[in-house]
Amino acid sequence: MVRVVGENVENGIYSLREAIAIAEGLHLDLVEISPTANPPVCKVIDYKKFLFEQKKKQKEIKAKSAKIVVKEIRLGPNTDEHDFQFKLKHAMKFLEEGAKVKVDVFFRGRSIVYKDQGEIVLLRFAQELEEYGKVEQLPKLEGKRMIMMIAPKK
């Protein structure tokens, strides 16, 4: 015995054979909605149409979700003032557009000796961008790179 619900169907309790016959008579599908209920609940619907509408809803939800863009800016431990200001302007523009900025200092060869200098450059970069974004991840050394993430302010 199953409880049958749906449009154009007299809701009630039928045997499984009767429920299938009702669905076939309407050229629709019998779908089990709640198997744990007593008696189980089945719905008479067009299953292909139901799947199509679910995919459509999922697509809409995905389209509405915010996409986070991460822009990367690479500096060196000995970056001079002009280059620093140039990259700073780019970072400001990225943060104003709503993108996160990943700033990294790349140490080449033996320049890894100047880790503290690289950290100073990153902290200065973060200080200059204080009004545009907030530091999400403090400078962290990963191999030959020191990485810092800055998120835009709302």
Image (cartoon, helix red, strand yellow):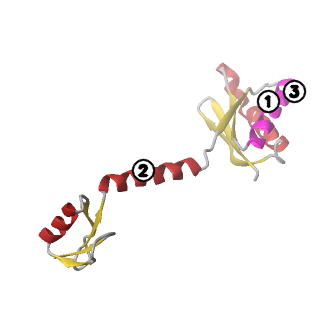
The percent position of residue 60, horizontal first and vertical second, equals 52, 51
| Disc 2 target residue | 55
Determine whether the residue tagged by mark 2 lies in a helix, strand or loop.
helix
Above or below, comparing residue 76 to residue 120 in the picture: above
| Disc 1 target residue | 87
Amino acid type for the residue under numbered disc 1: Lys
C-alpha span from label 2 to label 1: 43 Å
Amino acid type for the residue under numbered disc 2: Lys
C-alpha span from label 2 to label 3: 53 Å
Ranked by sequence position, the earlier of labels 2 and 1 is 2
Asked whether, in this view, residue 83 is left or right of residue 15, the answer is right
| Disc 3 target residue | 81
| Residue at 65% over, 38% down | 70
Seen from this angle, which residue lies furthest left? 17
Rendered-image quadrant of the N terminus: bottom left
Magenta-colored span: 81-97
- Decide which of 54, 24 is in the foreground and name it: 24
